[in-house]
Image: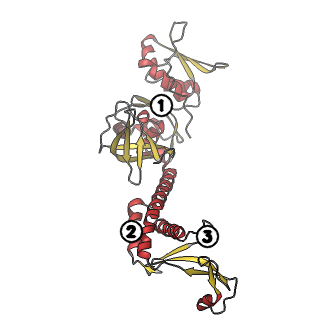
Amino acid sequence: MYKIGKKLLEAAEEIEKLKNIPKETFIRAICDSIAGAYRKKMKLLSSDSIHVQYDDESGEIGVFVPKTVVATVNDTVREIGLDEAKEYIPDVVEGEILELDVTPDDFVEFGRIAATTAKQIMTQRIREAEKFNLREEFKSKQYTTMAGSIKRIEYTVRGQPNVVVDLGSFDVQIPMRLQLQKENYKVGNRIRVYIQEYREDRKVPMIIGSHVHENLVKELFEIEVPEIEDQTVIIKSIAREAGQRTKIAVMSVSDDIDPVGACIGARGSRIQNVLSELRNEKIDIVRYSDDPVDFISNALSPAEVMEIALFDDKQGRRAVVTVAADQLSLAIGRGGQNVRLAAKLTGWKIDIKEAGSVKAVEPAEDPELEQSEVLS
């Protein structure tokens, strides 16, 4: 054994503090590198067993290898003579295997040889440990929102900005496609991010966050509205065009609680906090109903509906909605946004028809929007 003191343990504890990598992982990597250097120096095979042990109490480190007890030694690396073996264990017999301390006398010089191997192994082990920690952190945080500060803005080879957000225990990257188009992202700004995806398809693994996911809105309401948190008020579905407008359908399990009022709060205090986080994105709180006529009518708010005809045929679930002439543009919305979000919120294809007109006005299609799923 060679006494190296407490320096190795101190270095391991420092790595654990800075990188969140267990000190045992660091020490094991050092021991493996010493074993690799010994194997190389003694020209041992990969199948030859070598054990390197570090005693954190005494600060000693040693190299141990198994040697077979033989009458005549032909291989000094793998065998030990019977007479010499009896110096360790008096009643040892030929054929037994002893694990012996073979720590080199020139350990300091030997340690320098091991340093090159150690560097390679440590780099690999630290990378593996960081990946493991990141994966575990991601598993516990996936599909939730977290608040942090923008650490830096990185640019891809195509010149697209990636926003890197420091969330404390790890960083999350928001690619351009998941950023709000009109948002001015600046280093140091506080931001809330939806944890969406873990990627390990490159040397440095990363966690992908989103600022446009509709569940970001859902979680913000869960934070601001206690009735949603305790499931007295339930969010049934959300339709969002990030940065512009969101419709959210809510219901109450108690007749004593108004779900829309609970989400808005006294003098709009609750919804105002959500709007502030979303940079004043427009939000419509819609009362959910099991009756599709009522639900579609509510979803088209603020437009007033005169009549709704429902069809469920080969073309799917369709609703032809009749509105007064002065409500037509309001029902459709700018660029078809209001009717498009209402269709996504309810799951019905909606055509708007002016009262007295034969032909319905179909909403503008947005190929990137998919029909929303009912949220539990």
Label 1: which secondary element: strand
Check disc 2: other Cα within 10 Å, few if <14, some if 14-19, many if 20+.
some
To which quarter of the image does residue 346 belong?
Answer: top right
Coloring scheme of the render? secondary structure
As measured in the structure, the alpha-carbon distance from the residue carrying label 3 to the one carrying label 2 is: 30 Å
Q: Residue at x 53, y 24 (%)?
A: 343
As measured in the structure, the alpha-carbon distance from the residue carrying label 2 to the one carrying label 1 is: 58 Å
Q: Identify the residue position indicated by label 2 in the image.
A: 11
Q: Percent from the top left, x then y, of residue 52?
A: 52, 73
Task: Pick the quarter of the image with the C terminus.
Answer: top right
* In this rendering, the label closer to the viewer, 3 or 2: 3
* In this rendering, the label closer to the viewer, 2 or 1: 2
Q: Identify the residue position indicated by label 3 in the image.
A: 48
Q: Nearer the viewer, residue 184 or 85?
A: 85
Vertical arrangement, residue 172 with respect to residue 18, above or below: above
Q: Identify the residue position indicated by label 1 in the image.
A: 286
Q: Residue at x 46, y 43 (%)?
A: 208
Q: Residues at badges 3 and 2 in contact (C-beta under 8 Å)?
A: no
Label 3: which secondary element: loop
Q: Residues at badges 2 and 1 in contact (C-beta under 8 Å)?
A: no
- Going from the N terminus, do you reach mark 1 or mark 3 first? 3
Q: Nearer the viewer, residue 96 or 75?
A: 75
Label 2: which secondary element: helix
Q: Residue at x 44, y 68 (%)?
A: 113
Vertical arrangement, residue 330 with respect to residue 266, above or below: above
Q: What is the three-letter code of the residue carrying label 3? A: Asp
Vertical arrangement, residue 314 with respect to residue 172, above or below: above
Q: Nearer the viewer, residue 238 or 200?
A: 200
* In this rendering, the label closer to the viewer, 1 or 3: 3
Task: Find residue 149 and name its label.
Answer: none
